[in-house]
């Protein structure tokens, strides 16, 4: 069983790594110095066991990525107190659990939330080890062995079972935000989570297997639309955004994740964009998928987690 789960995780990781944003398919990875991360708070989950390769960073697609994260951190982006709604969102970037798209799916998302009065916290969670050499990391992953690779959709539950360290990081993030809620002027009952790709998988895993994390609301952006099993009676409201041409999560089996939330009589909203590919995040593309953040903001406003903007 352990071997099977590991094979599933490796297969999905390879697909996640290969599904880079469509706007710059040939953009080369370039090593960069570790950027300043002012305000980053070390979480109490400790170093990743058996992970000797140190953290490193690179740029690609005009964005910054972290690799080999050994120690998890949480970076606050707090709103102007005059605009603050009292809500907070933990932001989980994606990258196949091998890297983290810290800028496009982390800092830029957090800045946009803070500008709308929502406290945001970028979770730099621990990652699976990859080669220290960037060229070796950038080399295309080998194809999964015959018979060992389920489709990305069927493998999601297997991936969830293989990310216990990352779930621990997410739980620690929720605990830290709640412990500092008064200082940061946050309502402890209004702390949600949004994730992208692998970060969306982590968001769902935190919701379904994260014990005391208990997000008040969740967003899954290009994380798949297949049901992950039974939905608890107290499942949080769910926002989903994904493109129809996503190469990693082609929709061949309907929207069973949506249907599972509806069957549990829990709130769910789906945005299914004609184009956008995988990994669009906050990139300024010409596709309608670029509107996901505005849709997310309106959804949050509808539920009372964000103040309406003058344009709404």
Image: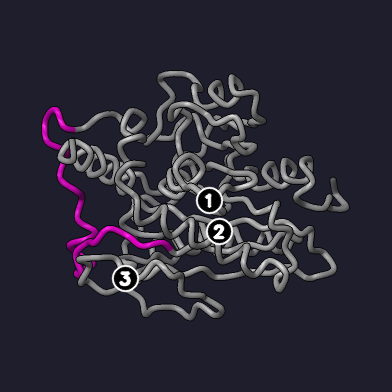
Q: Is residue 152 left or right of residue 110?
A: left
Label 3 – label 1 distance at C-alpha: 22 Å
Within 10 Å of disc 2 (Cα), the crowding (few <14, some 14-19, many 20+) is many
What residue sits right under mark 1 in the picture?
A: 212
Main SS of the magenta segment? loop
Which is nearer the N-term, disc 3 or disc 1?
A: 3
Which is nearer the N-term, disc 2 or disc 3?
A: 3
Residue 230 in the image, given as x and y percentages of width and height: 47, 26
Residue at 39 percent of width and 66 percent of height: 45
Please report contact status of discs 2 and 1: CB closer than 8 Å, yes or no: yes
Task: Judge whether residue 22 can be spotted in this image.
Answer: no
Residue 16 in the image, given as x and y percentages of width and height: 33, 45
Task: Judge whether residue 114 can be spotted in this image.
Answer: yes
Residue at 32 percent of width and 41 percent of height: 161
Residue at 44 percent of width and 42 percent of height: 209
Q: Is residue 7 magenta?
A: no
Please report contact status of discs 2 and 3: CB closer than 8 Å, yes or no: no
Task: Work out whether residue 259 or residue 236 is closer to the camera in this orientation and state it.
Answer: 236
243 vs 74: above or below: above
Task: Work out whether residue 2 or residue 12 is closer to the camera in this orientation and state it.
Answer: 2
Within 10 Å of disc 1 (Cα), the crowding (few <14, some 14-19, many 20+) is few
**Magenta stretch bounds:** 125-148
What residue sits right under mark 3 in the picture?
A: 47
Please report contact status of discs 3 and 1: CB closer than 8 Å, yes or no: no
Label 2 – label 3 distance at C-alpha: 19 Å
- The N terminus lies in quadrant: top left
Label 2 – label 1 distance at C-alpha: 9 Å
Question: Farthest right residue?
Answer: 310
Q: Is residue 129 magenta?
A: yes
Tally the marks: 3
What residue sits right under mark 2 in the picture?
A: 174
């Amino acid at each position: 069983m352990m071997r099977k789960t590991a094979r599933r995780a490796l297969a999905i990781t390879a697909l996640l790594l290969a599904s880079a944003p469509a706007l710059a398919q040939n953009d080369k990875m370039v090593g960069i110095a570790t950027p300043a991360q002012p305000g980053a708070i070390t979480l109490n989950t400790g170093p990743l066991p058996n992970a000797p390769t140190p953290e490193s960073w690179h740029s690609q697609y005009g964005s910054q990525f972290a690799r080999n994260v050994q120690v998890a951190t949480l970076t606050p982006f707090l709103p102007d107190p005059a605009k603050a709604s009292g809500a907070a969102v933990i932001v989980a970037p994606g990258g196949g659990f091998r890297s983290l798209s810290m800028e496009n799916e982390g800092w830029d998302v957090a800045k946009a939330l803070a500008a709308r009065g929502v406290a945001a916290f970028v979770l730099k969670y621990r990652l699976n080890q990859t080669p220290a050499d960037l060229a070796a990391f950038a080399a295309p992953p080998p194809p999964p062995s015959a018979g060992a690779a389920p489709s990305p959709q069927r493998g999601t539950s297997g991936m969830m079972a293989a990310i216990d360290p990352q779930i621990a990081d997410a739980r620690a993030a929720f605990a830290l935000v709640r412990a500092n809620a008064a200082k940061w002027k946050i309502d402890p009952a209004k702390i949600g989570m949004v994730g992208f790709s692998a970060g969306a998988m982590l968001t769902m895993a935190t919701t379904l297997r994260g014990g005391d994390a208990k997000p008040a609301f969740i967003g899954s952006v290009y994380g798949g639309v297949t049901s992950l099993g039974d939905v608890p009676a107290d499942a949080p409201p769910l926002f989903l955004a994904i493109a129809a041409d996503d190469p990693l999560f082609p929709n061949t089996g309907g929207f069973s994740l949506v249907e599972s939330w509806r069957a549990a009589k829990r709130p769910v909203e789906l945005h299914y964009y004609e184009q956008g590919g995988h990994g669009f995040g906050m990139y300024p593309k010409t596709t309608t998928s670029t509107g996901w953040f505005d849709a997310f903001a309106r959804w949050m406003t509808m539920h009372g987690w964000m103040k309406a903007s003058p344009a709404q």
